[in-house]
Image (spheres, rainbow, N blue to C red):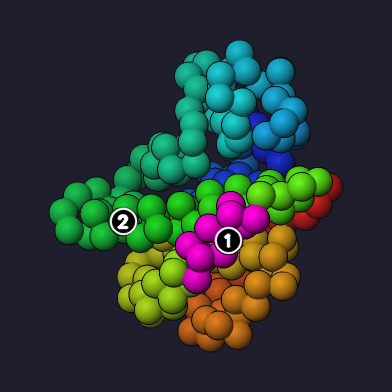
Amino acid sequence: MMKLHWSPRSPYVRKVMVAAHELGLADRIRTVRTVVAMRKPARELLPENPLGKIPTLVLQDGTILYDSQVIIEYLDSLAGGGKLIPAGGAARWQELRRHALLDGFLDLLILWRNERDRPQPLPDLIEAFALKTDAVLPAIEAEIEAIAAAPLGLAQITAAVAGAYMDFRFGDLGWRARCPRFSAWQEGFARRPSMISTPIVDA
């Protein structure tokens, strides 16, 4: 069994678990509840990941992998390669570019939430996060049909997880009304068994 440092609140962990289910590898992963926070590093995690971040995957031979994209690339290779991330050519760069937009958006949302929840959030940071979100959402909306038309891959998984994370942490963002095509696609993807099996919850 592989060991995955895991939390039901982390969208990055959810990306990995959705990918594992889609690749038929979820039963080869043992999840270990690991609580991480920006202001409270998980000391028990630091020997395996000095960044103190999840997901962190420990292989049977002791090899340690992080972050979510690296872990998913590894799982993809276990499943034969080229399943969720094209092996080469223009399709690979397109997939990775789309993933960079969507994963970067998750980074933005995490930082925004951390700042928003401080006792005295900095107004200029809050404004910057909102401004970037106002740029990212139309970019996703403009590209979601092309993302949806591509084979199931890393970008689709990340888009679906990002939509769910906005519902989870940013209920007042109104992203579904602002992005009707993204919203409709995400609702459909959320019905896949891989998403149903990996709910994001505050526990």
Residue 21: x and y in percent read: 56, 53
Front residue of this view, candidates 141 and 201: 141
The amino acid type of the residue labelled 1 equals Glu
Residue position for label 1: 127
Q: Say if mark 2 contacts mark 1, CB within 8 Å.
A: no
Q: Which mark is residue 97?
A: 2
Front residue of this view, candidates 49 and 31: 49
Left or right of 82 on screen, residue 20: right
- Specify the quadrant of the image occupied by residue 156: bottom left
Q: Is residue 126 magenta?
A: yes
* Label 2, label 1: how far apart the Cα atoms are: 26 Å
The residue segment tinted magenta is: 123-134
Q: Is residue 29 above or below residue 134?
A: above
Residue 117 seen in this snapshot: yes
Q: How many marks?
A: 2
* Residue at image location 45% in from the left, 67% down from the top: 136
Front residue of this view, candidates 103 and 151: 103
Residue 51: x and y in percent read: 56, 25
Q: Is residue 27 above or below residue 97?
A: above
